[in-house]
Image (cartoon, rainbow, N blue to C red):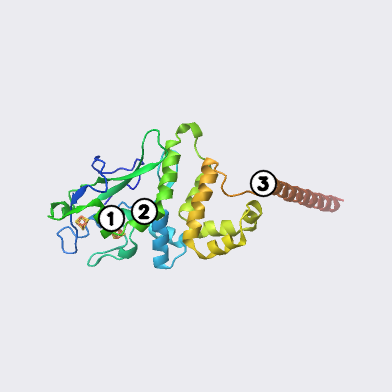
Amino acid sequence: MSAPTFDIPFKSPAIPAVLTGQARLRFNCYKGISCFNACCKRADITLTPYDVVRLKQRFGLSSEEFLKQHTVPFQMDADGVPGLKMRTNEEGACLMLDPEQGCTVYPDRPIVCRYYPLALLNIREKDSSEARESYSLVREDHCKGHLEEREISIEDYRKEQACAEFDRRNRDWYRLILKKKSAGPGVGRPSEMSLQMFFMASYNIDMFRRFVLSDNFRRSYRLQDSFYEAIAQDDLTLLDFGLQFLRQVLFGERSVEEVESAWDKRLDERRQVWEMRVKAEVAQRQKEEDARYQGEL
Ligand code: SF4
Ligand code: SF4
């Protein structure tokens, strides 16, 4: 199973035809089909931020623990924008797979698994700022679902697989990636700090929460107490804020109001700490020199 979910260069056997929601698909998948689990035994599952939230909540894990136990990072493009894949065993099988029962996280399975054998594409037309959602069909020899009689429209297949909530939650993140991609080399490679921020706000949501709740952040941005209370409790509110913050970090969209001169104040504080450290080191060295001099007398 290897389906791209957005228009970036993943390796994929997707058939290039671009399909709309009205297009019909000849496909069926059910427990008992001869290839049952074959797709999950060669899993190449790219995760979205909403996938991570669903799965970490299912396991009751912090995002750090979930990332450590169940994911592998990769680079989504030449600029090093970080992506995340589900961890597999050495043979390439998804760790969520039970050989008898199938997917053990089925109600919370990632969006790539829901769409398969389709891939969701976000394509921006030339001269348009809006991305259009369409689909392509993935045909892999091991998948016998294409030989079944059932015909279904892509819209109905999306309903059957409960894709809508995932699509709604993922949409702005796909668009952020698309915007980064279509900005081209003119805007340059994002700084290492922006890439780390992208990883944290997209996937390591509990670390991002600590960052936003820190005194430094509160001193730097004008946000209501009710905002901090909400993000302290709710992963999805935090995820939405993360996207807003990333648009500010990556594209300079000023939608999170900054405290005037907060940055200068922080630099000033750091300079003072640094000067104090230097003074303390000089005093210590002087003390050591004096002690040695006394000893030599
Ligand atoms: S998450 Fe479930 S459906 Fe997706 S590859 Fe793993 S076992 Fe298969
Ligand atoms: S029909 Fe395709 S999607 Fe369904 S179990 Fe078989 S390989 Fe997987």
Residue at figure coordinates x 42%, y 54% from the top left: 49
Task: Give whichever of discs 3 and 2 has the lower sequence position.
Answer: 2
Cα–Cα span, label 3 and label 1: 46 Å
Q: Residue at x 33, y 48 (%)?
A: 5
User: Which residue is denoted by mark 2 in the rendering?
Assistant: 167
Q: Residue 263: which numbered mark, if any?
A: 3
Q: Amino acid at mark 3?
A: Trp
Question: Which residue in the protein does label 1 denote?
Answer: 158
Q: 10 Å neighbourhood of mark 2: few (<14), some, or many (≥20)?
A: some
Numbered badge on residue 247: none
Circles 3 and 1: CB atoms closer than 8 Å: no
Point 38% across, 57% down: residue: 51
Q: Is residue 232 visible?
A: yes
Q: Answer with the quadrant where ligand 2 appears in the image.
A: bottom left
Label 1: how many residues lie within 10 Å, few (<14), some (14-19) or many (20+)? some
Q: Foreground residue, 18 or 6?
A: 18
- Rendered location of residue 160, percent (x, y): 26, 59
In the image, is residue 280 above or below residue 13? below
Amino acid carrying label 1: it is: Arg
Q: Looking at the picture, does residue 5 appear above or below residue 52?
A: above
Left or right placement of residue 35 versus residue 50 in this view = left
Mark 3 or mark 1: name the one nearer the start of the chain. 1
Measured from the top left, where is residue 293 in percent x and y? 84, 49
Classify mark 3: helix, strand or loop. Answer: helix
Residue closer to the observer: 237 or 144: 237
Q: Earlier in the sequence, mark 2 or mark 1?
A: 1
